[in-house]
Image (cartoon, grey):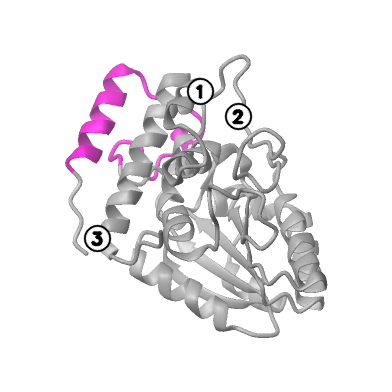
């Protein structure tokens, strides 16, 4: 069921963040920072935008989602569980031996995962292939691909962008989780990456800039992308790494670290008391 109420979507995003913290804490392993920063984006996609049905995970007409920054699987697994693709209790087995919920998503094992990802820079190429296939077989599905801003330092990203523009993939929507941090620190200090908007424009994309934590703005951006014809769309979503947990926010150290018991309890308390206005 499509959720249109903004306050309800904000609450769903908060529920997603709690699930991410619980999942990473239980495993004592994982990537909470970038998972928290993309929670609002995934909430809008899975509960408001995408044409998907958990009862028909392999429906050929479904929209596709590619988590190119595959290390943020706690976010993807959590939203799939909340959507009803599998039992939420299974999240307690994340990164455990014999669990199907591995550190990086596996399309052959996890219901609702459309592409196996993990090697940064490769997901967009897969998404481009899906969008081309949809054009060829007239399936009519849209393809969404979530990138990390550190990830777009990879050259393969821009090769995929060229292919997307050449093939006029207006059914492709790229979302950049632009939290300005990667594992080694700030992106501009690691690689000098700047003028991201200009880069996507130069590669032929229609570019939309939004706050990645503003549910209403995200919905408007995705709706605009649907109406854009002849070129692919790139939504540059300005986000905060670790969003929702005060001591994790804007801290590169929480890129790939699990909270201890005290940190876990504090994080859950903050999320439990979070207030949102629709």
Task: Tell me whether circle 1 and circle 2 mark residues in contact (CB < 8 Å).
Answer: yes
Span highlighted in magenta in the image: 245-273
- Res 103 label: 2
Give the vertical position of 20 relative to 123 (above or below).
above
Asked which secondary structure carries label 2, the reply is loop
The residues bearing labels 1 and 3 have C-alpha atoms spaced at a distance of 31 Å
Asked which secondary structure carries label 1, the reply is loop
Pick whichever of labels 1 and 3 is earlier in the sequence. Answer: 3
What residue does disc 3 label?
A: 7
- Res 29 label: 1
Q: Is residue 70 left or right of residue 10?
A: right
Give the vertical position of 85 relative to 227 (above or below).
above
Q: Is residue 125 magenta?
A: no
Q: Is residue 212 left or right of residue 132?
A: left
The residues bearing labels 1 and 2 have C-alpha atoms spaced at a distance of 9 Å
Whole-percent x, y for residue 16 in the image = 38, 43
- Res 202 label: none
Mark 1 or mark 3, which is nearer to you?
A: 3
Q: Residue at x 66, y 76 (%)?
A: 205
Answer with the quarter of the image where residue 136 lies. bottom right
Task: Tell me whether circle 1 and circle 3 mark residues in contact (CB < 8 Å).
Answer: no
Given residues 199 and 156, the one toward you in this image is 156
Q: For the residue carrying disc 1, how many other residues have a C-alpha within 10 Å: few (<14), some (14-19), or many (20+)?
A: some
Answer with the quarter of the image where residue 135 lies. bottom right
Given residues 178 and 3, the one toward you in this image is 3
Mark 2 or mark 3, which is nearer to you?
A: 3
Given residues 244 and 103, the one toward you in this image is 103
Give the vertical position of 226 relative to 211 (above or below).
below
């Amino acid at each position: 069921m499509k959720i249109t109420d903004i306050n309800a979507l904000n609450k769903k995003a908060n529920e997603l963040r709690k699930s991410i913290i619980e999942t990473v804490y239980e495993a004592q392993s994982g990537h909470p920072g970038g998972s928290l920063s993309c929670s609002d984006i995934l909430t809008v996609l899975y509960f408001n935008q995408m044409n998907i049905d958990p009862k028909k995970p392999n429906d050929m007409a479904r929209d596709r989602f590619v988590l190119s920054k595959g290390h943020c699987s706690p976010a993807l697994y959590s939203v799939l569980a909340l959507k009803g693709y599998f039992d939420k209790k299974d999240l307690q087995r994340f990164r455990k031996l014999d669990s199907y919920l591995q550190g990086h998503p596996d399309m052959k094992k996890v219901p609702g995962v459309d592409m196996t990802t993990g090697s940064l820079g490769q997901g967009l190429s897969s998404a481009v292939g899906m969008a081309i296939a949809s054009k060829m077989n007239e399936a009519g599905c849209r393809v969404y691909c979530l990138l990390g801003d550190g990830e777009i330092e990879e050259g393969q990203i821009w090769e995929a962008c060229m292919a997307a523009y050449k093939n006029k993939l207006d059914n492709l929507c790229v979302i950049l989780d632009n939290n300005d941090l990667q594992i080694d620190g700030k992106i501009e200090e690691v690689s000098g990456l700047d003028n991201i908007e200009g880069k996507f424009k130069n590669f032929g994309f229609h570019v939309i800039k939004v706050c990645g934590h503003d549910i209403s703005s995200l919905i408007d951006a995705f709706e605009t992308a649907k109406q854009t014809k002849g070129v692919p769309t790139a939504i540059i979503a300005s986000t905060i790494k670790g969003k929702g947990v005060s001591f994790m926010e804007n801290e590169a150290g929480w890129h790939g670290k699990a909270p201890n018991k005290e940190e876990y309890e504090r994080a859950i308390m903050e999320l439990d008391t979070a207030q949102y206005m629709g």
